[in-house]
C-alpha cells in the first residue's frame, strides 16, 4: 500500500462520505462497488477516523486492493482497486 497518490492509476469513480460516521461510509462503499467492474479504481474521501480501520478491513474481506491511504488536514483519502 502506498502512502501517497504519486504514480497511482486514475480513479473510475469517487465517493465522498465527508460528514458521515460509522457504519455509513462502509455501507455507501458497498453500494458503490456494486455498480463498478473488477479492476476499476474507487476513490473514497472520508472525515471519520474510524475509516482508517474499516476501509482496510473492507478491502481485505471483499478481496479488493487498497492502493493508497492518505490523511490530509483531517480528511482521509483512499484508492481501492476492485477485486
Image (cartoon, helix red, strand yellow):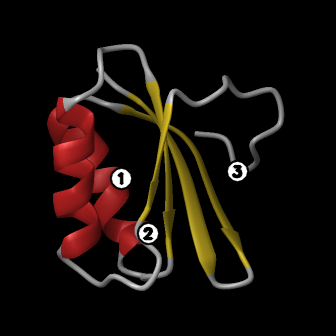
Badge 1 crowding class, 10 Å Cα cut-off, few under 14, some 14 to 19, many 20 or more, is: some
User: Viewer-proximal residue, 19 or 65?
Assistant: 19
- Give the crowd class for mark 2: few <14, some 14-19, many >=20 residues within 10 Å: some
Q: What residue do we see at 64% from left, 84% from top?
A: 74
Give x and y (percent) for residue 45: 52, 62
The answer to whether residue 67 is left or right of residue 82 is right
Q: Which residue is mark 3?
A: 3
Q: Which residue is mark 2?
A: 52
Where residue 60 appears, as percent x and y from the top left, is 26, 41
**Residue 72 in the image: above or below residue 11:** below
For mark 2, give the secondary structure.
helix
Image quadrant of residue 57?
bottom left
Return the disc, 3 or 2, that comes first in the chain's sequence.
3
- Is mark 1 in CB contact (under 8 Å) with mark 2? yes
Residue at which label 1 appears: 56
Task: Quote the CA–CA distance across marks 1 and 3.
Answer: 13 Å
Residue 36 in the image, given as x and y percentages of width and height: 29, 24
In whole angstroms, how far apart are the C-alphas of marks 1 and 2? Answer: 7 Å
| Rendered view: 67 above or below 9 | below
Q: Which of disc 3 and disc 1 is earlier in sequence?
A: 3
Nearest to the observer: residue 12 or residue 47:
12
Note whether 51 is above or below 40 in the view shown: below
Secondary structure beneath label 1: helix
- Find numbered disc 3 in the image and state the secondary structure of the residue it sits on: loop
Numbered badge on residue 73: none
Quarter residue 48 falls in: bottom left
Q: Residue furthest right?
A: 6
Q: Residue at x 18, y 47 (%)?
A: 30
Q: Is residue 66 left or right of residue 28?
A: right
Query: Left or right: where does residue 36 sit relative to residue 7?
Result: left
- Quarter residue 51 falls in: bottom left
Amino acid at each position: 500500500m502506498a502512502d501517497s497518490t504519486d504514480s497511482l492509476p486514475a480513479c473510475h469513480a469517487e465517493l465522498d462520505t465527508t460528514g458521515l460516521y460509522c457504519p455509513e461510509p462502509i455501507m455507501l462503499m458497498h453500494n458503490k462497488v456494486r455498480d463498478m467492474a473488477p479492476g476499476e479504481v474507487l476513490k473514497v474521501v472520508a472525515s471519520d477516523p474510524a475509516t482508517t480501520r474499516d476501509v482496510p478491513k473492507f478491502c481485505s474481506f471483499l478481496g479488493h486492493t487498497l492502493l493508497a491511504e492518505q490523511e490530509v488536514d483531517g480528511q482521509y483519502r483512499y484508492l481501492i482497486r476492485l477485486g
